Amino acid sequence: MSADDSVLARMITTIDDNTNGFRLDLMRMALSSSDASAQSLLQATLALSSFHLGRAEEALKHKVRAIKSLSESVRTESASKPTQLAACLMLCVYSVFDATDTTWNVHLQGAKTISGALTKQEQEMSCFEFISPWYNYHDTLSGYSLPAHLPGKKHRAPRIILPESDSENRKEIHIVVGESTGTLDHQRITLTAEFYRVATLLYLYQIAPDIAIPEQAVQNLVRNGFKLMDQMNPCTSPWPLFIIACNVTSDSERLKILTVLNAMIQKRRIGNYRIIKGLIQTLWKQQDLTADEVIPKKIDWRNLIDPDSCTPSFI
């Protein structure tokens, strides 16, 4: 379990302070009981730690135990649903680390089902303050990977919902600082937030009518994205990186993207990054094939995924 505390808890989250639920909430939930839901979370955490340490066979054993315990807990009325939710999400994270495991969306669907069954009392538990945004982060980014539906859901056309903005809250990023077993890097937090903002605008321009896109807006955003990546060293956010990769236009920019991706793969050893890298290279090849067209064809990267392969998660 020391590997989870010293490495994984810091790596999975941008902010490592006294609110880091990967260390504080999940460990307490996994070790506070011997029931099936707690055992599932414990085994899922051990699976992730073992895999990160290069012990693939041991990781697989823990993963199987986690799934069995989770299945057992679902059949038990007294089981803790917040702990079940955390176990599903931890299995989802494991699937992102292990490129051979293509079930992250299945575990997320399980988390979605459990989340919908939580009582008001369960939602008011202290651990839910961490679990809720963790789940929402996975659920939100899954909408980019699987915009139409998740397994078991009827097909629906995607909707874009633009919430009312609070101009006061947009002026600055508020950080609650406490004692930390890791180093709280305020600059990195700000850079990461800006990196996601740039990518969000690029994504908006991808789906917006051409007439609505300001001149040079995409190029300027790509340029800003590269400046942010230079400052982060290494980049740890795959979704903004992928969005920028979809919008680069020169070989030199492509080389920069691959350099950043290779550094991410070497530093974090997350198997899903290799899937994203392969997808980016396939996308570039398709863009090259249509480069001479008068009106370049917009390519949906989802259509480039091999049916026998896995749709990547961008967490």
Image (tube, rainbow, N blue to C red):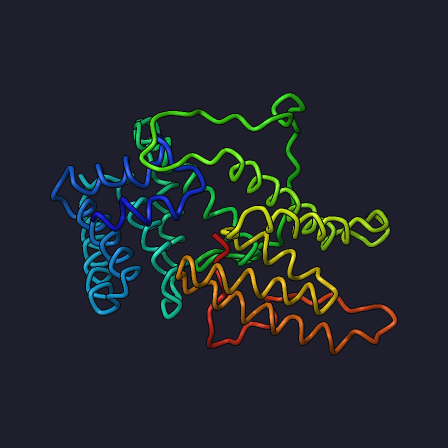
Q: x%, y% of residue 257? A: 61, 62
Q: Residue at x 64, y 40 (%)?
A: 161
**Camera-side residue: 192 or 157?**
192
In the picture as drawn, the residue positioned furthest to the left comes out as: 34
Residue 181, position in %: x, y? 31, 35
Q: Residue at x 64, y 67 (%)?
A: 255
The residue that appears at 59% across and 52% down in the rendered structure is: 240
Q: How many marks?
A: 0
Above or below residue 237? Residue 21 is: above
In the picture provided, is 184 more to the left or to the right than 33?
Answer: right
Is 173 positioned to the left or the right of 108 in the image?
right
Looking at the image, which is closer to me, 166 or 52? 52
Residue 247 left/right relative to 266: right
193 relative to 292, above or below: above
Relative vertical location of residue 264 with respect to residue 31 in this rendering, above or below: below
Task: Please say if 148 is above or below 287.
Answer: above
Viewer-closest of 167 and 78: 167
Q: Would you say 277 lies left or right of 292 here?
A: left
Q: Residue at x 26, y 55 (%)?
A: 49
Q: Position of residue 216 (x, y in %)?
A: 83, 51
Q: Residue furthest top?
A: 168
Where residue 238 appears, as percent x and y from the top left, is 53, 55
